[in-house]
Amino acid sequence: MKEKEEIRILYMDDDPGLGRLFQKKLSQMGEIVVAGNGQEGLSRYREEKYDVLVIDYQMPGLDGLQVLRKLVDGGSVPPVIMLTGAGNEETAVEAMKMGATDYIVKDIDGKYFQLLPLVMNEAIKRFRFAEEKKRMQKELERYANELERSNKELEQFAYVVSHDLKEPLHTIRGFAKFLEESYQDKLDEQGNEFMGYIIDGTSRMERLISGLLDYSRVTFKNSDPEPVNCNELVEQVIRDLKATIDLRNAKVTFDPLPTITGKERLLLRVFQNLIDNGLKYCRNELPKVHISAEEDGKMWRFSIKDNGIGINPKHAERIFFIFQRLHNRNEFSGDGLGLAICRKIIENHKGKIWVESNQGEGSTFYFTIPKGE
């Protein structure tokens, strides 16, 4: 069984009899130090630590309020209980405003001694809770600062690595192109085929590096969320994908969409990736993509439905991870970054993204965005 915690109490009162009575009545609470006036009480407070201070309002030299003022001016103080035998409501209000935790009137029968343990224990609990909250807040601020510094270092690292990795790839691809153009006639069919693999491999590596860097840049940094008209956003995507839509004789339609709060550039990327995937992963002669949105509690739920090849439900989570592909590159182009970037963008907007699909039956991608003011 856990032993009862003892506390240290500093009691300030110019009446020696009340001081001895206080020690006798409350000795079970812990160690009690008695100071005969305000100045002595301040001196004892500076010498040692106490869990709670009990101060009489009427004292010669420095009264209770003057002592409290000096304590507060010195910084954070433990709970202070103000006692008085002749105070009034105004005194109580003034004491509380100055930082006293509670205010108790001393009655002739001494019944206030029964109330004091409850008041002191409650005051100590509240004080410790507040101090722990402050400590945790400081820890959170420290972690936030460290995270911000770490993110800046990571971003700088991504830029440096991207540049340093691309340089040798440019060199390899440049010499490979030179060899292909200058020695094409001297290489046999297999040699030219291998040269094509080298050029294609370096080009793909460059795209992966660029995509990885792009993935690391998905953030709200340096910009605040803003109202985004999703109708205009989808119209922009349709214009951007016009060549693909015309080439595939595809049809992209959408219902009236809401205006939401977010980052326009990032949300444009989400719609573009999802609509483009609906057009790309389709073996039908006439690809169809339809976009709609509906309210879902405090969120807007968007859906992008296509009539494509569909997805095996067992891969519904996997496709949102970076570099995860379900098809051979000869069958469908791509580097496995688009949906991972979409997920990161939606999660940065405090939403979720998922897919409902069956193989051969098309797919419907859903994502949610909080309703903005």
Image: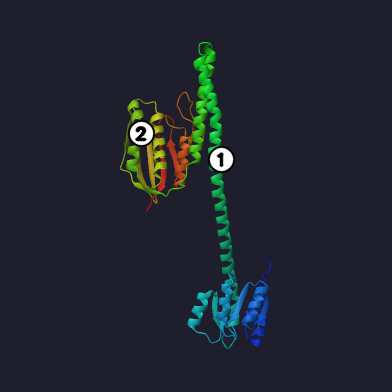
Q: Nearer the viewer, mark 1 or mark 2?
A: 1
* In the depicted structure, whether residue 219 falls above or below residue 77: above
**23 and 33: which is toward the camera:** 33
**Sooner in the amino-acid sequence: mark 1 or mark 2:** 1
Whether residue 325 is visible to the viewer of this picture, yes or no, is: no
Q: Look at the numbered disc 1 and give the secondary structure of its residue.
A: helix
Determine which quarter of the picture holds residue 242: top left
**Contact, CB < 8 Å: mark 1 with mark 2?**
no
Q: Nearer the viewer, residue 309 or 49?
A: 49
Picture coordinates of residue 243, whole percent (x, y) = 34, 28
Tell me, for residue 157, which label it has, or none.
1
Depth check: give the residue in front, 179 or 221: 179
Is 170 drawn above or below residue 93 in the view shown? above
The image shows residue 53, relative to residue 204, as above or below, that is below
- Which residue is pictured at 41% across the width and 38% down the height? 269
Query: Left or right: 232 with respect to 193?
Result: left
The answer to whether one can see residue 3 in this image is yes
Q: Amino acid at mark 2?
A: Asp
> Could you tell me which residue is drawn at 50 percent across and 26 percent down?
203
Q: Is residue 43 left or right of residue 226?
A: right
Alpha carbon of mark 1 to alpha carbon of mark 2: how far? 32 Å
Q: How is the image coloured?
A: rainbow
| Numbered tag placed on residue 370 in the rendering | none
Q: Which residue is mark 2?
A: 240
Q: In the image, what residue type sits under mark 1?
A: Phe
Residue 77 placed where, x, y %?
Answer: 59, 71
Please rate how many residues cluster around mark 2, counting C-alpha atoms within 10 Å: few if below 14, some from 14 to 19, many from 20: few
